[in-house]
Image (cartoon, coloured by chain):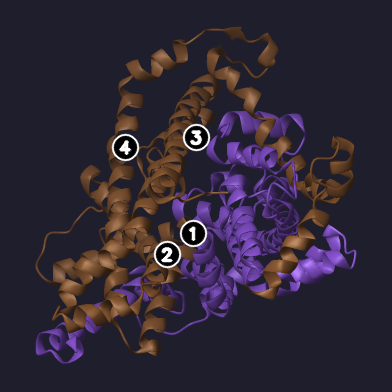
Chain colours: A brown, B purple
Amino acid sequence: MKPGTDMAANAAPKANPGTGTIARQFAATWRLHLMLVPAVLVALIFKYAPMPGIIIAFQDFKPWKGISGSSWVGWSNFELIFSMHDSRQVILNTLIISCLKIAFGLVVPVIFALLLNEIRQTGLKRSVQTLVYLPHFMSWVILGGILLDLLSLEGIVNQLLSFFHMQPVMFLSEGNWFRFTVILSDLWKEFGFSAIVFLASLSGINPALYEAAEIDGAGRMKQTLYITLPSMLPIIVVVFTLSLGNMLNANFDQIYNLINSLVLDKGDIIDTYVYRSFQEGQYSLSTAVGLFKSVIGFIMIGGGYYSAYKWANYRIF
Amino acid sequence: MYHKNPTYRIFYLFNIAFLVLISVVCVLPLLHIFAVSLSGKSAADSNLVGLIPVDFSLDGYLRTFENSNFLSALKISVLRSAVGTILAMCVTVLAAFPLSRNSKEFRGRSFYVWFFLIIMIFDAGLVPHYILMEKINLINSFWIFILPGLVNVWNIILMMNFFRALPRDLDEAAIMDGATSFQIMSRIYLPVSLPAIATLSLFTLVGHWNAWFDGMLYMTSPDRWPLATLLQTIVVVQDFSKTGIRFEDLQTLSNRSVKSAQIFIAMLPILLVYPFLQRFFVKGIVLGAVKE
């Protein structure tokens, strides 16, 4: 027993008033409540106050009539979403792009972390980290501008391809290539940063395990398969379940900055569709699509947190 | 030892080569843009520049800084980044401290946890947000860049986890001496929380600097845009009709080396801040993500 633990036990009753009346409890904790006031106010105004606005998804909303004056249309906006070819395609695009992003965004950082973990020269390791984390901090406006430039038909990438006598590739103006480009560039931007948590879990593995395996004659490959990967499994499960919440989030910033009318059929996603319908003045449709996304997102994220808690005992708060 | 195994040694060499290659690939596009920004107009426009500037010229930068649209957008960006980050950090730290107390010490905790959890997993969507901003008269106001971003639940959680990981013995003594929660937070917790605060400041700062969509959505006139929004229109949309930019300026702005110069200027603050904060943020993220 450390002396500190004793003291903590003695001091605890002083810090909390125990089973007193509500007034007495509040007297002891009002400062804590006060500290939360700014955050609560901002959340109430900017996150909670817009929520009633989602009822316009069930209206034929006209801005000049306001929410109270617009007519009710029940579920017909949602029926419209699922009957229109456009919106069904948009949901499909979102699912395809985001699921591939989730899959590669999990596997590649794990492999990268394993490879980087082998490096014993600290300086080299740190330099690699500095460079691969960097794109994460750049906005998609900047990267979009760079990619549009690099990947155009006259761009440097196609110049390289033609140097090797290959056909030019329309990275951003052909549907399937567009998806490929979107997924690859997202991976390029985020793989390093996503690897941080895996690198941390690697450094937490008990070295005695490896020593024992060494004595038993296990090579590095076997050590990785039977010690490293199993030790990483809990954090991999947590990252995976939490990323499921992004199932309908294919990244607005990225797609909006890379998309053009040629690839709208294969590249348009829910968020870009929501924004476009908003710009076209279809407020109710836009809200309905957004609400659909939010509800599915709510279920996926909520489910993700719950299962991360269940399987890996990960608690968000 | 597996290190001495010849197969492993070959693997090790390949591994180093591979990782170096990957790191280079991560910064190559940025270097290319830098080279273009320092090149002469004709060389840049005809795509002759690789990684080394051709016909070295500072024209791109000079013309960028002559442009009044660019300068006013830069000012707005600097202002929103500074004000937004400072205020957001105050709100975050103030909210994180009570939440880091356990529910015995702080009876209301679970209510607040649910309160914040809900906004983390449910979003009202674009149109309801826009209607609200219209109602409370924030459209075209500078404060629309600042206020909605003051609460970021992820940041509150990261900060809260950092506070929780600090040894509790620290504040026991202070409580005995009659210190209030405010004093415990400001005198005991804050001074030792520098890594977490640096991490979150970096994230918030970068977020503000890179934010472009709020400018486009909520600002009806381009002279209220932050740099990222202006850049989005110039570099990505290449639509100058709604920016109100004069025709002569338009000629300049569509010039490839000028564009690259603007992209590079927009990257610069991040490039400057990031290396110094790197050691902090790795620690900060890990603490928020890996915990029991």
Q: Residue at x 51, y 22 (%)?
A: A282
The disc, 3 or 2, on the residue closer to the chain's N-terminal end is 2
The disc, 4 or 2, on the residue closer to the chain's N-terminal end is 4
C-alpha separation, residue under disc 3 versus residue under disc 4: 18 Å
The reply to whether dot 3 and dot 4 touch (C-beta < 8 Å) is: no
Q: How far from the left and from the top, in percent, is residue A217?
A: 13, 81
**Subunit of mark 1?**
B
C-alpha separation, residue under disc 1 versus residue under disc 3: 32 Å
Residue wearing tag 2: A197
Q: Secondary structure at mark 3?
A: helix
Q: A213 or A148: nearer the eye?
A: A213
Q: Secondary structure at mark 1?
A: helix
Crowding near the residue tagged with mark 2, few <14, some 14–19, many ≥20 C-alpha atoms within 10 Å: many
Residue wearing tag 4: A95
The reply to whether dot 3 and dot 2 touch (C-beta < 8 Å) is: no
Q: Amino acid at mark 3?
A: Tyr
Instruction: Kindly report which numbered mark, 4 or 2, lies closer to the viewer in this rendering.
Output: 2
The disc, 3 or 4, on the residue closer to the chain's N-terminal end is 4
Crowding near the residue tagged with mark 4, few <14, some 14–19, many ≥20 C-alpha atoms within 10 Å: some
The reply to whether dot 2 and dot 1 touch (C-beta < 8 Å) is: yes
C-alpha separation, residue under disc 4 versus residue under disc 2: 26 Å
Q: Give residue B289's mark.
A: 1
Residue wearing tag 3: A275
The reply to whether dot 1 and dot 3 touch (C-beta < 8 Å) is: no
In the displayed structure, A268 sits above or below B236; it is: above
